[in-house]
Image: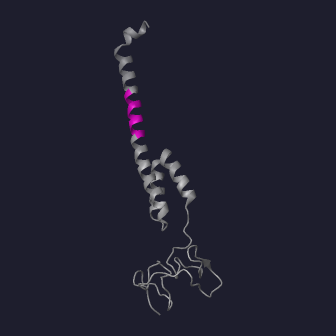
Amino acid sequence: MPFCSNCGQEVKEGTKFCSGCGASLTGKTPSSNTQSNDTSGNICPKCGSIMPFGNVACTNCGTLLNQDKHTAAIVLGYICSLFIPLFGVIFGIYLLTRTNKDVHKHGLIMIVLAIIMVIIWWLFFSYMAYRSRMRFYNSFYNWPNSYYY
């Protein structure tokens, strides 16, 4: 049996795309009318071919199968980016490592948002510390005058 030149996974004779990484095994463009004779497995959303369970990519057209939307991670990541920036960065890195390219932009936005929130929180707490120091300074050095007010 031949092996994929991209990832090294063993592939069946006559397949056009690797079932592990989706790389083309031939230089030809995929046809949208051919279907597998196997009746059990995942159906490719692009060409309609039936792929065996466990395939990452369609062997007919190369489309990645079972791309998760990661909706829960996206929502939690945005919330954490606002309130707990460290977890926002962790969710952002998690989304950057997924195979679905559509969620990568959310990962980048979460990381940037978390960094911006850290800067805003730092400015806010610095200002509050400054006000506290000034309040102490004014009460300490102006105590005789503040006694009469």
Q: Position of residue 91 (x, y in %)?
A: 48, 56
Q: Quadrant of residue 147?
A: top left
Q: Nearer the viewer, residue 32 or 88?
A: 32
Farthest top residue in view: 148
Q: Name which residue lies at 46% across and 84% down.
A: 9
- How many numbered marks are there? 0
**Figure check: 109 above or below 18:** above
Farthest left residue in view: 141
Q: Position of residue 6 (x, y in %)?
A: 40, 81
**Figure check: 29 above or below 131:** below
Q: Position of residue 39 (x, y in %)?
A: 65, 84
Q: Quadrant of residue 89?
A: bottom left
**Prevailing secondary structure of the magenta residues:** helix
Q: Position of residue 33 (x, y in %)?
A: 57, 82
Left or right side of 146 for 43: right
The magenta-colored residue range is 120-130
Does the segment drawn in magenta span residue 93?
Answer: no
